[in-house]
């Protein structure tokens, strides 16, 4: 005898080869009332084609202004288990490395005090625990913080910085992304936990221009590893790639955006002066080609999703900066950037929007970075522009 | 039960305590890697030591049961070491080559999907959707499940000209960095918000609500101590709703999904690119959104058939031209495709050379 399911629409999403989020919610729902009402409310959303969540309210833990996002069902009578169902953001580990014991520790705490559902990870890179009720927030925090975990950012604060896998397991890392992000996160705990900025601020570090963390598209400050030097060519490894069937002329030389390579059928030559370090050839012939010389990073600013003026990609602020512990030069720059934003930024204005609104010159002068051609795709087109008295003195 | 003593501002645990010994030992000294199969790669260190990675898909939303299962598998084959990728995959970090086969057998046995490395479709970056977000105009997890079921072969085996990065954002706030993906879905509204004057008066700050509008469609309504919205100016972005939740923008009859394509974040061969609008609207059709899946398949098939090796979707489209893209995909070109927002003039064609 079969009983009719309460969740016929969601059940459809348990079929097929890809792991099912519905099965995950059901696993949690089997032992947790909050997760069960999450499941039931979601089925209603699928039926009605709309969400039933409200956000906001003053929820959080003592001494922190971030890390918790208030979430409430808009149908609390129907789904009392999720009447309050707040998100807890736990700061992840650099490079998203975990041990089995650390994951079990997270699970044990979350089963005791929350729904038993989590994201590994949210888009910004936090461990997202969803969700729990207001009175559980302090216990959750006590359990996590006493075991060495802390909350991530939310609201108008420094959001949890994140990075690619970097030198931990990648031959292309020009900088130690894990250490940079760990160091910055430790240094700027106050900026993360007590929101005092005009709006959110995101930092992401990628070891090279492949940018596996998407730093250039989604960080107010993007750190992208690069080098000033040359590419070392191992000609025997080049020959090996050719032997294995790689069409080096078509796949490597012809796709080089700067035309800096020549292949004579036996050896590959690179005119390093013309190379822009785009990473195409290196990523395709990783055994044969290696960056060499001075390693560091390009510092870019301003990327964000569409609100309010449309989406932006980060643009170059400092073309090259050495990034070695304790990263004082970078931290000093970051503090100047925040000072400028604090001085001129409007409520809910991202750094990139502010710099676009007021112009690059004022910003460059304030943070102490000189103009350079690497900062632009092309010089301006129009013949009207500002002069200051000091420009006349300089001439 | 007594609670342990809380600590504040201690920051995250140190990543050094979470690295497998072979990584700690060879940190920063990796020489090259090889992709052994769609879900397995090996990194070689200068010391001659190696680490193998086995990648499996996850739905991002996990139960503690599943996380514990992942931990148990890591204990059995990886000395307890594992990691997650930016795209929500799980990577088992194997130091002992003899463990590779039994690990994969157990993963297969437990129905994990192994793959996602190389010129393929990896996991889909996505947002909370109806599962947990107040501003969602669709459900991200459901769309991801429907798409990844359809494209499972492109995760586990089949190759494409280059990697194809998919993303889903459940509203235009775009927590999922949809704006720079090969093919992405973004849920949109198409009707101006309804103003609930009584609650606006009591709960919303008027200046910040008015300032939230990118098109200047919101103005004060002083007689009601509220705001009014000029429907003709509204682009339905929903930013005002984020500031003032009394401006109800959810509208199940009109909400749905737009498809954008051609973005990327890497600098390889060509600069990072934004995704551009290719399908302005498809209605929400849960639980499996068949019309959306079909439209994405159509774009993916055209890319697979037409792109040269190593070309990303955006590079392929730029080479063939947008007019040819719309012709071969059969997608309709509409008023909505022509930009009338902040960068419109940069997007107009300023040449008489184009294709038919």
Image (spheres, coloured by chain):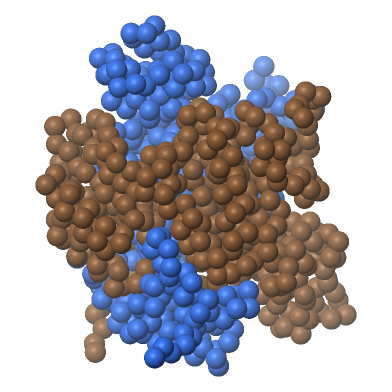
- Examine the rendering and report whether any part of residue B3 can be seen: yes
Horizontal relation, residue A253 to residue A380: left or right: left
Q: Residue furthest front?
A: A1
Q: Residue furthest right?
A: B223
Chain letter for the brown colouring in the rendering: B
Tag count in the figure?
0
Chain letter for the blue colouring in the rendering: A
Camera-nearest residue between B247 and A246: A246
At x 68%, y 80%, the residue is B203
- Examine the rendering and report whether any part of residue A140 can be seen: no
Q: Is residue A149 above or below residue A356?
A: below
Question: Residue A55 occupies which quadrant of the picture?
Answer: bottom right
The N terminus of chain A sits in image quarter: bottom left
- How far from the left and from the top, in percent, is residue A111? 30, 79
- How far from the left and from the top, in percent, is residue B88? 39, 56
At x 51%, y 50%, the residue is B166
- How far from the left and from the top, in percent, is residue A225? 40, 34
Q: Is residue A393 above or below residue A309?
A: above
Horizontal relation, residue B138 to residue B229: left or right: left
The C terminus of chain A sits in image quarter: top right
Camera-nearest residue between B303 and B132: B303
Q: Residue furthest bottom?
A: A77
At x 29%, y 67%, the residue is B67
Q: Is residue B137 above or below residue A135?
A: above
At x 27%, y 44%, the residue is B40
- How far from the left and from the top, in percent, is residue A3? 43, 90
Camera-nearest residue between B108 and B63: B108
């Amino acid at each position: 005898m079969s009983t009719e399911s309460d969740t016929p629409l969601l059940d459809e999403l348990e079929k097929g080869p890809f792991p099912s989020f519905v099965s995950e919610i059901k696993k949690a729902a089997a032992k947790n009332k909050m997760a069960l009402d999450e499941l039931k409310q979601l089925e209603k959303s699928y039926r009605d084609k709309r969400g039933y969540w409200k956000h906001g309210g003053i929820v959080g833990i003592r001494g922190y202004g971030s890390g918790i996002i208030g979430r409430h069902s808009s149908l609390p009578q129907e789904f009392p288990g999720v009447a309050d169902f707040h998100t807890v953001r736990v700061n992840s580990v650099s490079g998203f490395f975990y041990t089995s014991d650390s994951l079990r520790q997270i699970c044990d705490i979350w089963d005791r005090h929350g729904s038993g559902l989590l994201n590994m990870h949210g888009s910004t890179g936090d461990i997202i625990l969803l969700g729990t009720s207001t009175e559980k927030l302090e216990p959750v925090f006590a359990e996590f913080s006493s075991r060495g975990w802390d909350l991530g950012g939310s609201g108008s604060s420094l959001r949890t910085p994140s990075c690619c896998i970097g030198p931990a397991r990648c031959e292309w890392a020009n900088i130690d992304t894990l250490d940079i992000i760990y160091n910055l996160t430790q240094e700027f705990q106050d900026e993360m936990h007590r929101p005092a900025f005009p709006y959110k601020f995101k930092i992401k570090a990628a070891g090279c221009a492949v940018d596996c963390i998407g730093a250039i598209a989604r960080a107010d400050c993007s750190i992208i590893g690069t080098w000033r030097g040359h590419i070392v060519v191992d000609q025997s490894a080049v020959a090996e790639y050719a032997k294995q069937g790689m069409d080096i002329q078509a796949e490597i030389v012809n796709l080089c955006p700067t035309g800096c390579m020549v292949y004579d059928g036996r050896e590959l030559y690179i005119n390093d002066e013309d190379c822009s370090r785009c990473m195409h050839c290196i990523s395709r012939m990783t055994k044969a080609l290696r960056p060499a010389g001075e390693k560091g990073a390009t510092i870019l600013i301003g990327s964000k999703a569409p609100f309010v003026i449309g989406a932006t990609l980060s643009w170059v602020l400092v073309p090259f900066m050495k990034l070695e512990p304790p990263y004082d030069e970078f931290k000093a720059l970051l503090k100047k950037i925040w000072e400028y934003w604090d001085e001129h930024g409007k409520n809910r204005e991202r750094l990139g929007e502010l710099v676009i609104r007021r112009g690059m010159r004022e910003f460059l002068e304030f943070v102490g970075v000189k103009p350079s051609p690497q900062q632009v795709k092309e010089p301006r087109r129009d013949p009207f522009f500002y002069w200051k008295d000091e420009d006349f003195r300089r001439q | 039960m007594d609670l342990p003593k809380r600590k504040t501002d201690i920051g995250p645990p140190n990543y050094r305590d979470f690295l497998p010994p072979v990584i700690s030992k060879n940190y920063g000294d990796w020489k090259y890697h090889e992709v052994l199969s769609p879900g397995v790669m090996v990194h070689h260190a200068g010391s001659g030591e190696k680490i193998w990675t086995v990648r499996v898909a996850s739905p991002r939303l996990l139960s503690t049961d599943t996380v514990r299962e992942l931990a148990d598998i890591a204990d059995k084959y990886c000395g307890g070491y594992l990691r997650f990728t930016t795209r929500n995959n799980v990577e088992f970090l194997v130091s002992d080559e003899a463990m590779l086969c039994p690990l994969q057998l157990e993963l297969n046995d437990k129905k994990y999907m192994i793959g996602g490395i190389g010129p393929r479709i990896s996991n889909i970056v996505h947002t909370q959707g109806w599962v947990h977000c107040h501003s969602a105009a669709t459900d991200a997890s459901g769309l991801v499940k429907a798409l990844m079921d359809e494209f499972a072969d492109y995760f586990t085996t089949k190759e494409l000209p280059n990697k194809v990065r998919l993303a889903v954002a459940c509203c235009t706030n775009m927590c999922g960095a949809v704006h720079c993906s090969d093919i992405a879905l973004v849920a949109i509204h198409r009707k101006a918000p309804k103003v609930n004057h009584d609650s606006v008066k009591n709960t919303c700050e008027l200046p910040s609500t008015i300032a939230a509008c990118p098109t200047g469609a919101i103005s004060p309504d002083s007689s009601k101590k509220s705001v009014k919205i000029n429907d003709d100016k509204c682009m339905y972005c929903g930013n005002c709703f984020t500031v003032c939740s009394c401006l109800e923008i959810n509208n199940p009859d009109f909400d749905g999904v737009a498809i954008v394509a051609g973005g990327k974040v890497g600098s390889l061969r060509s600069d990072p690119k934004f995704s551009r609008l290719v399908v302005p609207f498809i209605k929400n059709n849960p639980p499996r959104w068949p019309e959306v899946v079909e439209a994405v398949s159509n774009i993916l098939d055209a890319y697979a058939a037409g792109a040269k090796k190593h070309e990303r979707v955006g590079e392929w489209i730029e080479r063939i031209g947008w007019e040819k893209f719309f012709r071969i995909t059969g997608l309709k070109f509409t008023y909505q495709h022509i930009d009338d927002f902040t960068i419109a003039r940069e997007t107009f064609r300023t040449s008489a050379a184009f294709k038919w």
